[in-house]
Amino acid sequence: MSSLPVLVLNSGSSSIKFSVYESAHGDRSKLFEGAVDGIGTDLGKFWIKDAAGKKLVDQTPALPTRAVAFALVASALHSSDFPAPQAIGHRMVSGGPTVQENQRITPELIDEMESYTAFAPLHTPIAIYIMREALRLFPGIPNFVCLDTYFHRTMPEVAKHMPIPDEYTEMGVRRYGAHGVSYESIVYQLEPKVPEKLIVAHLGNGASISAIRNGQCLDTSMGLTPTGGIISGTRTGDIDPGVLLFILRKIAETTESATAAADQLEIVASKKAGLLGVSGLSNDMRDLREAIKTGNAKARLAVDKFTWTIAKWIGSFVAELGGLDMLVFTGGIGENDIASRAEICAGLGALGIVLDPARNNTRGEAVISAENSPVTVRVIPPAEDLMIVNHVIRLMGK
């Protein structure tokens, strides 16, 4: 086959990102990428740019629903302006306890994954919708699911198992983790010299951290759902269960049903907490940094809570790994927020982590540790779409 374009679809709560790679004969070159943003808002955007960054499409359409949004993507990809995809890879946070391997998508598989929506409630519904639409709008084209949880499947039982009665464990309640495609891409980029003891911090609006030994996940911060672990843009991170019970009882006082009360609690824990909840201002680190400059104490507390929590997780993972060779920052905050990296590492000298302020004063890929730092500290952007393409080609070969 002279050409094998692979379409990658990565859906979010209000966006659909996509890219197309040429993958024939071992090639992995990106042909173009795009997104529809602002679904369900008055700020809809639809753009496509080529590998050189030139805008091919730049529109501000009304995007009242995800159906309208994905129809725009499909229409563009069916036009003669772009190569028709020969395979499609879908990013999926979690397939639940019964779907743990990356594999070809069938209607039956979609139904199975949908039954575990509660394991990633903010992500699964739109991912499921996009899969069904892709099967309908691209008939005959093989579709494959690539799971974030796939990378974390190597965790030992002591890390996976939750301290709960067996009846709930048997329902699939355990630690699954997220951002696995990002972590896998960091390991891929470090090959063939992957450090034995590696910690990667994926810091963005959703934030997590993983301990990686010899390229395999040993432990990760997110649990059953992406709400656990580190405080994120709008998520609590790990929290005393008694706090959630207290909030639930307060909600139940004015709610008609248990299900409605649980739904409201989910909104509090996943959409109104985290940096937004503490600051009362924003879930965007850039906004909080600007507010700190004006003396906003709540913004300062929110950021301190974020960096303090990450430093604690790094310390605990160093203990699990029995030392540390390399720390990698990735994700939007990890790559671009110089101050957050400095604040996280400021108290970690005893663990061998020493930043060079001049090297850290950069955005994008870099080594930012001091020459005398026992631990190498790097910034590496993730290559998630590339990893999905690699999985698609591997699975097609089967």
Image (cartoon, rainbow, N blue to C red):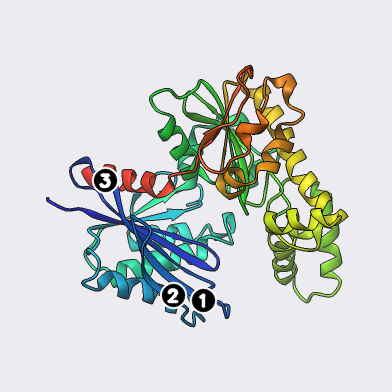
Secondary structure of residue under mark 2: helix
Q: Position of residue 144 (x, y in %)?
A: 33, 53
Is residue 150 depicted above or below 10 in this figure? above
Q: 210 and 336: which one is in front?
A: 336
User: Is there CB contact under 8 Å for labels 2 and 3?
Assistant: no
| View extreme (left): residue | 1
Q: Which residue is mark 3?
A: 393
Q: Which residue is mark 2?
A: 69
Tell me what residue is drawn at x 31 percent, y 73 percent. Answer: 76
Q: Position of residue 261 (x, y in %)?
A: 75, 68
User: Is there CB contact under 8 Å for labels 2 and 1?
Assistant: yes
Front of the two marks 1 and 3 = 1
Q: Which mark is residue 60?
A: none
Q: Which residue is mark 1?
A: 44
Whether residue 167 sits left or right of residue 83 in the image: it is right
Q: Earlier in the sequence, mark 1 or mark 3?
A: 1
Secondary structure of residue under mark 1: loop
Front of the two marks 2 and 3 = 2
Is residue 271 depicted above or below 212 in this figure? below
Q: 68 and 142: which one is in front?
A: 68
Q: Position of residue 29 (x, y in %)?
A: 28, 48
Type of residue at label 1? Gly
Q: Residues within 10 Å of mark 1 (few under 14, many from 20)?
A: some
- Any part of residue 198 in sight: yes
Secondary structure of residue under mark 3: helix
Distance from Cα at disc 2 to Cα at disc 3 = 27 Å
